[in-house]
Image (spheres, rainbow, N blue to C red):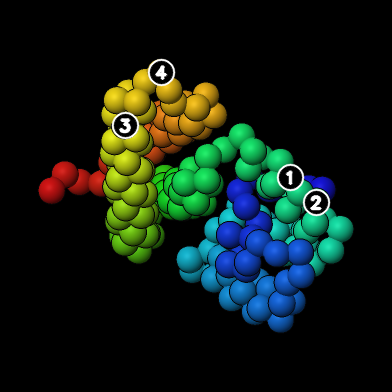
Amino acid sequence: MREIPYNPFDLLSVPRRPCLDLDLLEKNFRSLSTKYHPDHSSGDRTLFEHIQKAAALLRRTSSRLQALAEEKSKEKNIPLPAQELFSTLAAAIEESVVKRNAYQKTSTALAKALLFDDLLHAQRALLHAQASLETWKHTLEEELATIDSQWPTVPEEKVIVLAKSFLFVERWEEKLNEEIFELSTLLPEH
C-alpha cells in the first residue's frame, strides 16, 4: 500500500467502512481534485497528489481493507478521544503548512494578497483545533483528579489509557504551537 501522510477516508470525506459508495468517493475526488489542481488559482500540487493517492487507495478493495486493518491495529494504542481528534488536528496543521508554503513561494504582492485570506482561514482552523485539544486536556485533568481520589484502587488499564492520552495531548500541543508560531510570522499582529 502506498504511504499517505494522513487518513485517506478523512481526506476524501468518506466513511471508514469496508464497502464504500464509489459514486460518493468519485464525487468527492472530482470536487477536491478540481479545487486543488495545480493549474487552478487555489491549486496545491502536494495536496492534489495526496488526493489522487487517497482515491487510488480507496478505489481498490484490497488496499482499502488494508488501510482499515492498519487503523484498527493503531486504535489499540491510541485512546478513542485521541482518535477522534487526530483528523481535526492533522487537517488543520496540514492546511496551514500547505497555505504557508504557497504564500512563502509566491513572489508578487498581488499573489500574496490573494493568498492572505487562505492564511487567515488556516489560522482560524489551527485555533479551533487548539481549543478542541484544550477542552479534551481539561477533561483529562478532571479524570486525573478522579483517579487520584480513588488511588490505589484504580484499575491499571485506566491509568495506562490516561497516560497515553496525556502523551497524545503533549505531542499535539507542541505541533500545533509550532505551526501557529510559523503561521504568525506571516500575519500582521492585531
Most extreme residue toward the front is 153
Mark 3 / mark 2, whichever is N-terminal: 2
In the rendered image, residue 179, in percent from the top left (x then y), is placed at: 39, 38
Per the model, the C-alpha gap separating discs 4 and 1 is: 35 Å
Task: Single out the mark in the foreground, 3 or 4.
Answer: 4
Considering the numbered disc 1 on the image, is that residue within a helix, a strand or a loop? helix
Per the model, the C-alpha gap separating discs 3 and 2 is: 39 Å
Mark 2 / mark 4, whichever is N-terminal: 2
Q: For mark 1, what is the residue?
A: 70
Residue 38: in sight, yes or no?
A: no
Q: For mark 4, what is the residue?
A: 152
Q: For mark 3, what is the residue?
A: 146
In the rendered image, residue 152, in percent from the top left (x then y), is placed at: 40, 18
Which sits in the foreground, 56 or 111? 56
For residue 5, which quarter of the picture? Answer: top right
Mark 4 / mark 1, whichever is N-terminal: 1
Q: Amino acid at mark 1?
A: Glu
| Mark 2 and mark 1 residues within 8 Å of each other at the beta carbon | yes
